[in-house]
Image: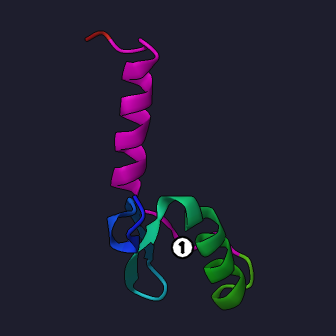
Amino acid sequence: MSDESERPTVPVVCPDCETTTRVAVSEVAAAVAKHNESLHDGEDVAHVDPDVVDSIADLAAADLGLTDE
């Protein structure tokens, strides 16, 4: 994937700022940390959308054979 628009992204939400943005998977940790440090004195306010986190956890559990399916 050489085109920037083709890179996979995940939604990052900040309830305090009332914003949602999409960030490249490879940059999500740094982007969340930078946002929280800059705007929320380092508190963990912004985060990856919880629905995405749950979906990834479900996929990982299935891949590891931890589900009944």
Residue 53, how many percent across, how many down? 43, 48
- Residue position marked by numbered label 1 in the rendering: 46
Q: Is residue 46 left or right of residue 29?
A: left
Q: Is residue 25 left or right of residue 56?
A: right
**Residue located at (35% from left, 15% from top):** 67
Q: Is residue 58 left or right of residue 45?
A: left
Residue 11, how many percent across, how many down? 38, 67
* Quarter of the C terminus within the rendering: top left
Residue 21, picture quadrant: bottom left
Q: Nearer the viewer, residue 11 or 3?
A: 3
| Mark 1, other Cα within 10 Å: few <14 / some 14–19 / many ≥20 | many
Name above or below for residue 44 compared with residue 56: below
Give the residues drawn in magenta, as a range: 43-67
* Quarter of the N terminus within the rendering: bottom left
| SS category of the residue bearing label 1 | loop
Residue 52, how many percent across, how many down? 36, 52
**Residue located at (56% from left, 59% from top):** 26
**Residue located at (40% from left, 55% from top):** 50
Q: Is residue 47 left or right of residue 66?
A: right
Name above or below for residue 10 compared with residue 5: above
Q: List the single residue furthest toward the front.
A: 2
Is residue 27 found inside the magenta-colored segment of the image?
A: no
Q: What amino acid type should be assigned to the residue bearing mark 1?
A: Ala
Residue 3, how many percent across, how many down? 38, 69
